[in-house]
Amino acid sequence: MKKIVFLATAFVMMFALPAGCTSANLVSIAYPQSAAFDDYETQSKIREDNAVDESIISSINEFSSKSASMILGNEQRNSCYSPLSLYMALAMLSTGAAGETQNELLTLLKQDDTAYLSEQMGKLYRLMYKNNDISTFFMTNSLWMNDDFEIKKTFVDNAMKNFYTAANTLDFNDTKAEETISSWINDNTNKLLKPEINIDPLDLLYIVNTAYLKDEWQDNFEEDATSKDTFTLSDGTKVNAEFMHGTFDSSIIKGDGFTAVSLPLKNAGSMMFVLPNEETSVNSLLSTPEYIAGMLRPKNVEHGSVNLSLPKFSYDSEFNLIQSLKDMGVTKAFDAQEADLTGIIDMDLSAFVSAVKQGTNITVNENGLEAAAYTYIAVSLECAPMETQTLELDFDRPFIFITLSENVPVFIGMIQNPAN
């Protein structure tokens, strides 16, 4: 019931602002078709109509490996990052860029053409969208435009058509505009995330993506099997944590420096848990794109029974992503003198990207998982502020997790201390 209420709220938000917020001109969107959990005929038709090219899946996986290693490689805390949310937001931005600015973005996204990229993002959106009695997975996109400026219609139309984007105009001089965008993110992440937004009157546009996933394990952990046990931190300190216990038929991956198991979710997704070998640290695995690629596209997959001990966990993460994107080769978009965003707006003054931020929330328990993310990109004018075996596997030390849908990584994170 909670999922149904959330979706109703999210849909209403396409048509009206939260009470007490600044006035806006909202253009509504409609969500794509979703099949019931046991409606296999409709599921098959959706897959047939929205077959995503393998090159796109490969591009997102390569982007995920590269970006996750850059963003998570040196983290010393519980951290969760959504590569799909960032990829979707950057894909939208690329459709409004031109020249070398667009080339840098497309190089990072491993694509050549924004029209093809837009079409494929639309197919992926429809393919991944889930809203039934068992689970929810969908992304929402929105454009928040400064009503003092005219954003190009071609950019907005493409965002609405292929990215299922709600287009909104706001008075960026009104302090309530910040609360409007923040509340929209909050409503579209099932109240899990509510970022602080700091709008400058010279901001032109906010590109916002949210992702929300709630699903159940195909085979739940029994709650009465959960017990307190010891988790060893990377520095050797021992803390108490609540461990779930169960025996599952699972895919088993023995990679270079790690062992992983994959637990299926009821709506065709999965969640992978990656345990580094004793002599290998979480950070050494996450700091190298090749290691992450080996987790996302493993070469050696076996199947067998796993006696699993896994700590429950729940936490938030926040990232400022501009420096990471610069390190990955995207530089011109952040330079007011070099950025070419003429696909978004025609101005004598230079427009540039002043902020790229992401926040996530994830909870894993006996029944399944719930996770949410937001990514926003702020486009501003110059002078705006920059900003078959049985395996005993005990996850009693820092480990990595990856959630996948349609073989696309939605969340990648690590647990350094489940007691935090």
Image (cartoon, rainbow, N blue to C red):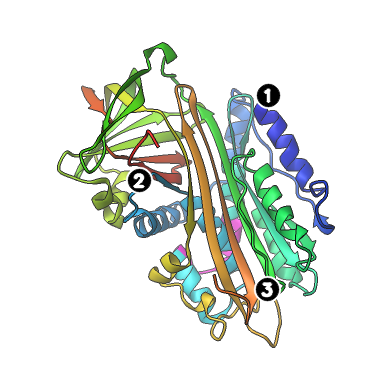
The image quarter containing residue 344 is bottom right
Q: Residue at x 46, y 72 (%)?
A: 330
Main SS of residues in magenta: helix
Which of the labelled discs sits on residue 296, or is there none?
2
- Label 3 to label 1, Cα distance in Å? 40 Å
In terms of secondary structure, where does tag 1 sit?
Answer: loop
| Location of mark 3 (residue) | 344
Q: Residue at x 67, y 52 (%)?
A: 182
The magenta stretch spans which residues? 109-120
* Residue kind at label 1, given as amino acid type: Met
Q: Does residue 302 appear in the picture of this structure?
A: no
Q: Residues within 10 Å of mark 2 (few under 14, many from 20)?
A: many
Question: Which label sits in the foreground, 3 or 1?
Answer: 1
Say what secondary structure mark 2 lies in.
Answer: helix
Disc 1: which residue: 1
Q: Earlier in the sequence, mark 3 or mark 1?
A: 1
Quarter of the image with the N terminus in it: top right
Is 298 displayed left or right of 98 in the figure? left
